[in-house]
Image (cartoon, coloured by chain):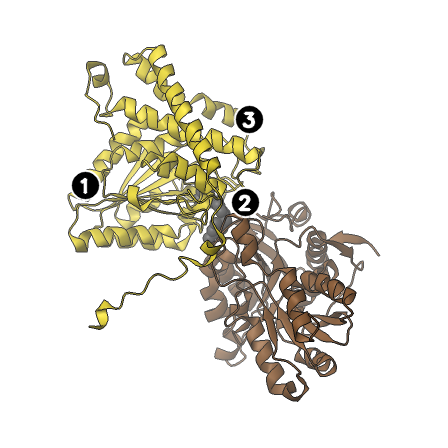
Chain colours: A yellow, B brown
Amino acid sequence: MVQEARTDRGSALSLPRPEEAYRDMLRVRHVAEKAYELFLKNYIHGTMHLGVGQEAVAVGVAATLKSGDYTLGTYRGHNHVVARGAPLDACFGELFGREIGLCKGKGGSMHLTSVEHGCLGSYAIVGAHLPIACGTAWSARLLGTDSVTSCFFGDGATNIGAFHEALNLAAVWKLPVIFVCENNLYMEYTPIANVTAVPRPAADRASAYGLESIVVDGNDIEAVYNVAAKAVQRARAGEGPSLIEALTYRQRGHSRTDPGRYRPSEEVAEWLERDPVTSFARRLENAGWTLDELARIEEAVVAEVEEAAERALASPPPGPEELFTDVFCGSNTSWRN
Amino acid sequence: MPVLTYRQALNEALREEMNRDESVFCLGEEIGRFGGSYRVTEGLLDEFGPERILATPISELGIIGLATGAAMTGLRPVAEIMTINFIMVGMDQLVNNAAKIPYMFGGEAQVPIVVRTPSGAGHQLTAQHSQVLEVWFAYVPGMYVVAPSTPADAKGLLKTCIRDNNPILFVENVLLYNDKGEVPDGEHIVPLGKAAIRREGDDVTIVSYSRMVNVALQAADALADDGISAEVIDLRSLRPLDMDTVLASVRKTNHAMIVHEGWRKYGAGAEIAAQIQELAFDYLDHPVQRVTGAEVPLPYAQSLEAAALPQLEFVVDGARTMVGKR
Ligand SMILES: Cc1ncc(C[n+]2csc(CCOP(=O)(O)OP(=O)(O)O)c2C)c(N)n1
Ligand SMILES: [Mg+2]
């Protein structure tokens, strides 16, 4: 990542590298837009869950992390993997099921993973990765590294047992983990409020388990950055886990085949008005960036995304031998001696 | 006779049973206003209200556990698990509790629950959304595993299962929901544990269940062109397992092949093959053959997914080889 000098105009903002963060927001957004376009053109099969509208959460948290920190997420995981810096051609390659893909074309949209960039998996069983995040945090403890784990999940995951077990494990052992609930108001189609008796499905429970519990405007990247930076600092200092409930909105349907008609149109309009990318652009403008500069940043990102998609499309599908690789891992027999 | 889709047949069974017996209720994720992931409960909320069509949080363990308690106290719950992949989250309730309560408590209590869920691959949904896991449950004494392959059976078996007093895993299939077929109106009951002979034949017995029955039937067509007459048996349930029908056929054809979508080792085919050799060894002219899914988590890329699923050619070629006509 390029070190960007902190300029005067940036000093009005809390993000240390605002322009880089904006570029990341745009990358995440345009990867989603391109993926959507290519899904319609049948280059992407199966299913796909876009996080359009939720970009500030992934990018705001990623901006607080450093190399060696871990990130785990869900099937709605493109945002987080892109925000951690995974190469875009390999991201697209995975969506297309090509050799160049992050998972060699075997995982697809729901399982984007880039260990090199700290991304230890996108998981498609709701809630299942929260205890895994406790494990990566425990290994930081035992191995004596200062690694912090960030674990993203939806509001719907707060009603599954794994969420509750993981929160307790993290709290009782003061694990260096940050749980980030992206509360986008809906599970698949039903509002989370219909099936949860407390107003803040994640935060209201977290405090009961003894976690630092934070609610934040998830469409405000600066706000997300500020609370995440504090949580990461606490975790690194051995002061224990935090849970951030980021209030945000899924601008599209649950998955590609869902037009999302069950959402009241005023609600959709209100949240589109609060789009995290355009809000951040407005803030940059107020802080001194010209519209022209911002447009040039976006043009460059669009070109980068287009080129990445082209490279991925040029990659062949995985060879038939890939069907049987990686089922079992190479045996290590050194322990026998 | 009316022609319905597999999905509509299931819907009709639920509606009829809920009308017939007030103790029947449904619970599951998104089953209310949205009619469930595969729209099987469509329209039932309007007809029966939110207490008998109970839309739950994402809580599979809670769903099956609640169903168990309700069943012990006089209700007949029909739980929907969005896909069989998520059932593992609630498996403890099914295997440790529901399937054992009658025995463990010396017959003091019964657990008449039906857990409906679709199994199977075919939409490039990859490793955590494409599994065939029903055989795990067929291993457990104390519960049944039922898997209809036609719309008529979907209705008739679901009605029977709802009336049965045992915990039952009712396995649907993601690729069968739109299949159409004739379905008897009203009271249509298919007995548990009675396999169906879908096509009669003399040279080879192909045993299957759920979606793979269709593959077996296509194979039988192809084999007929070669002058090989295949008998296709649809098991309809893995437990109870109707070996009488299978054995009678094998004694006639002297050749047995089992076709299923799930993994090979320890799969349903292993049990059926074992019973065939135990009970009809002297009738076999050839070792029992199995055509199954490849032993891998399902991959995403189209070419890899296709290669992981049992192919029609494997069934046809296997049967040809077995009867010595290559
Ligand atoms: C254990 C389990 N149950 C059900 C599903 C099916 N499912 C996939 S996404 C989803 C909704 C999840 O909602 P939420 O946690 O709010 O995340 P969002 O999709 O809004 O990001 C459901 C029910 C699943 N994947 N895993
Ligand atoms: Mg949600």
Circle 3: residue type: Ser
* Mark 1 to mark 3 CA distance (whole Å): 40 Å
Q: Earlier in the sequence, mark 1 or mark 3?
A: 1
What residue is shown with label 1?
A234
The residue located at (15%, 43%) in the rendering is A237
Q: Which quadrant of the view contains residue A20? A: top left
Q: Which quadrant of the view contains residue B227? A: bottom right
Circle 1: residue type: Arg
Q: Nearer the viewer, residue A155 or B66?
A: A155
Q: Nearer the viewer, residue A300 or B5?
A: A300
Decide: few, some or many residues near mark 2? Use Cα within 10 Å; few <14, some 14-19, many ≥20: some
- Of the two numbered discs 3 and 2 in the rendering, the one whose residue sits closer to the viewer: 2
For mark 3, name the chain.
A
What residue is shown with label 2?
A46
The residue located at (53%, 30%) in the rendering is A37
* Mark 2 to mark 1 CA distance (whole Å): 40 Å
What residue is shown with label 3?
A265
Q: Quadrant of the C terminus of chain B?
A: bottom right
Q: Secondary structure at mark 3?
A: helix
Percent from the top left, x then y, of residue A70? 28, 45
**Vertical placement of residue B190 versus A303, above or below:** below
Q: Earlier in the sequence, mark 3 or mark 2?
A: 2
Percent from the top left, x then y, of residue B161? 65, 67
* Mark 3 to mark 2 CA distance (whole Å): 28 Å
**Vertical placement of residue A9 versus B287, above or below:** above
Check residue B150 in the rendering and tell me which mark sits there, or answer none: none
Q: Is residue B57 visible?
A: no
- Of the two numbered discs 2 and 1 in the rendering, the one whose residue sits closer to the viewer: 2
Say left or right for B45 vs A179: right
Does mark 2 have its CB less than 8 Å from ligand 1? no
